[in-house]
Amino acid sequence: MTLKAARKRNMRLIIFLIALLIAAPALALDKVRFATNWRAQAEHGGFYQAVADGVYSRYGLDVTLLQGGPQLNARLLLAAGRVDFAMGANTIQMFESVQQNVPVVTVGRAAGQVDLDRRQYLAAPEGRRRVPAA
């Protein structure tokens, strides 16, 4: 191999590596923290299964599930920026959020066993300053 050919090959390699470094952030998964409304239970199974099967990662998400419980208020964690999405317990929580000026938005809901008891999926309003999780 001549010196000219070696330089040309090295230049192509350098260009390839630079392109790879530039594209690497685009390949990174978006980190999402989702808080459930209570400890892990059957109705949350789909969320946990999607993590286990890699469904979220196939769609560009790195999802961390945070279990709710008596000592964890998912709605307040959401308002404080500690989680990105939260599952609410029922429609009344959304009315209370409006009444108490808690900065959350309903982005979806799913009917429970009784149509009056609906699960709420909440997110912070767009543009809210995110606080890094401790």
Image (cartoon, rainbow, N blue to C red):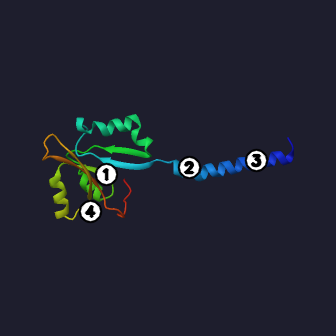
Dot 3 or dot 1, earlier in sequence: 3
Label 2 sits on residue: 24
Q: Dot 3: what SS?
A: helix
- Residue 103 - label: 4
Secondary structure under tag 2 reads helix
Give the spatial CA distance, label 1 vs label 2.
26 Å
Compare marks 1 and 2 and give the one earlier in the sequence.
2
Q: Amino acid at mark 4?
A: Pro
Precedes in sequence: disc 1 or disc 4 = 1
Q: Which residue is mark 3?
A: 10
Q: Which mark is residue 85?
A: 1
The alpha-carbon separation of the residues under discs 4 and 2 comes to: 34 Å
In the picture, residue 115 is in which quadrant?
Answer: top left
Q: Quadrant of residue 9?
A: top right
Q: CA distance from mark 1 to mark 4?
A: 12 Å
Residue at horizontal 23 percent and vertical 38 percent from the top: 43
Asked which secondary structure carries label 1, the reply is strand
Q: Position of residue 64 (x, y in %)?
A: 36, 44
The answer to which of marks 2 and 3 sits earlier in the sequence is 3
What amino acid does circle 1 point to?
Answer: Phe
Answer with left or right where residue 19 lies relative to residue 47.
right
